[in-house]
């Protein structure tokens, strides 16, 4: 089952680990900074295309962001 809070925490934690600001990440995804804030607060989820771009920008797998795997590079649940 999908855990929105886990998704939000992983996005925020990974962004901070990489030292990327909200505005920079928003620029990379071509979204407004408030969209990133909403992802990190658990109030919104990215569209499928943005999810893939988000994982690429955060150097992890989509499965990791979605809570399907524990290792950020693993793609096998």
Image (spheres, grey):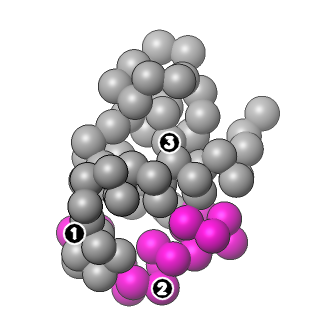
38 sits to left or right of 72: right
Q: Earlier in the sequence, mark 2 or mark 1?
A: 1
Vertical comparison of 5 with 43: above or below: above
Residue 66 occupies quadrant: top right
Q: What residue is drawn where x is 48% and y is 33%?
A: 64
Residue denoted by label 2: 34
Measured from the top left, where is residue 58 in percent x and y?
30, 49
Q: Is the magenta stretch mostly helix, strand or loop?
A: helix
Look at the image and tell me whether residue 46 can be seen: yes
Residue 77 lies in the magenta-colored region: no
Q: What residue is drawn where x is 55% and y is 15%?
A: 77
Disc 3 crowd rating (10 Å Cα; few below 14, some 14-19, many 20+) is many
Q: Which mark is residue 77?
A: none
Asked if disc 3 and disc 1 are in contact, CB closer than 8 Å, the reply is no
Q: What stretch is highlighted in magenta?
A: 28-45
Residue denoted by label 1: 28
Residue denoted by label 3: 65
Residue 60 occupies quadrant: top left
Q: What residue is drawn where x is 29% and y is 81%?
A: 23
Measured from the top left, where is residue 32 in percent x and y?
38, 85
Query: Marks 2/1: CA distance?
Result: 14 Å
Q: Which of marks 3 and 1 is nearer the N terminus?
A: 1
Residue 22 occupies quadrant: bottom left
Disc 2 crowd rating (10 Å Cα; few below 14, some 14-19, many 20+) is few
């Amino acid at each position: 089952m999908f855990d929105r809070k886990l998704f939000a925490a992983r996005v925020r934690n990974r962004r901070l680990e990489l030292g990327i600001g909200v505005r920079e990440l928003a620029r990379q995804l071509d979204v407004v900074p408030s969209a990133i804030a909403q992802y990190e607060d658990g109030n919104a989820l990215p569209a499928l295309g943005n999810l893939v771009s988000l994982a690429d920008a955060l150097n992890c797998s989509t499965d990791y962001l979605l809570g399907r795997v524990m290792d950020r590079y693993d793609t096998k649940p």
